[in-house]
Amino acid sequence: VAALAAAAAGLGDAGGGLQPVLERYRAAAARLDAAAAAEPAARFSLLPENHEARAAVADVAAAATATGAPAGSPQSDEAHLAVAQKLFQRLYDRPGGRPSLRRLHRTSHIAALAALRETSRAVTREVTGWLLYSDDERKLNRDVTEGLVRSGVVSEQFLGELDAHLAKLVLGGGSSAAAAMECGAHLVQHCVIVDPCVAPAELAATLDALGKAAQRPGAPDGLAQLVEQARAKGEKNGGGASSDG
């Protein structure tokens, strides 16, 4: 992810003010890695309150406050973004294997991003930008994208940006079209139908694009039915809401 790596390097070199933040983050990240490796298939939201991974996530989020800057200040936002960017990169840096064997790594890092979002509004804006404009197709990882939406890290007008971006990729017919279609269909199925956390209207552009793609020769089986089911849910009750970590 060339653009993301360059931006991360810039934050990492942004002066001595971030040094305490980055040092504390590295220690917390090592603690989180150890906890995730111990129970890789666990889901963060289902962990007991006293679980080591929860304590590690709290440590990661606390690292962003190490500057002592007032919440909402430019210095505070800079520290939060420095930590958020490292977390975001690590979502995709994990070695391959079955998704279930990376579940706690993924869901705990998303939980840490959600915690950072609570104390810096800039996190939602920047994470959405990294997700949309990274030049790496891993950004279309369906499980990561679902987690960012479900946790509220990508939300409100920024969810609208994701919706428009996915629709553009689906209809663009380029190299990312198939991955965007898979990611979009996954979001519709899991975030609108199975365990609702957004209303169908919040993914309206994606639904329109998937509906058009479903009419193409060779479209995935069941895609048109999925779109119809989501739209019917919107007509009935507008969708539900829930959250997950």
Image (spheres, rainbow, N blue to C red):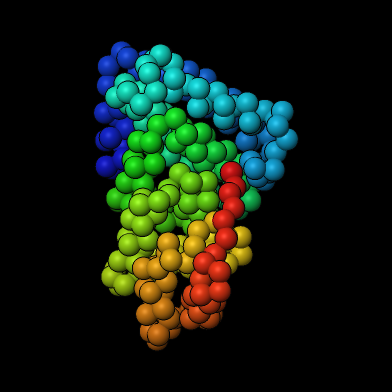
Q: Position of residue 130 (x, y in %)?
A: 34, 45
Q: What is the quadrant of residue 171 in the picture?
A: bottom left
Q: Is residue 82 visible?
A: no
Instruction: Give 3 or 156, whichever is nearer the viewer.
Output: 156
| In this view, 20 is above or below 103 | above
The count of marks equals 0
Q: Position of residue 183 (x, y in %)?
A: 45, 62
Instruction: Give 18 or 204, whichever is nearer the viewer.
Output: 204
Q: Is residue 61 shown left or right of residue 79?
A: right
Give the residue displayed 28% in from the left and 70% down from the top.
172
| In this view, 47 is above or below 239 | above
Q: What is the quadrant of residue 108 in the picture?
A: top right
| In this view, 169 is above or below 102 | below
Give the residue displayed 32% in from the left and 62% down from the top.
164
Q: Position of residue 125 (x, y in %)?
A: 34, 42
Q: Is residue 150 shown left or right of residue 64?
A: right
Give the residue displayed 51% in from the left and 33% down from the top.
115
Picture quarter with the C terminus: top right
Picture quarter with the N terminus: top left
Q: Position of residue 203 (x, y in %)?
A: 42, 64
Q: Is residue 236 visible?
A: yes
| In this view, 4 is above or below 231 | above
Give the residue displayed 58% in from the left and 49% down from the top.
243
Instruction: Give 222 or 116, whichever is nearer the viewer.
Output: 116
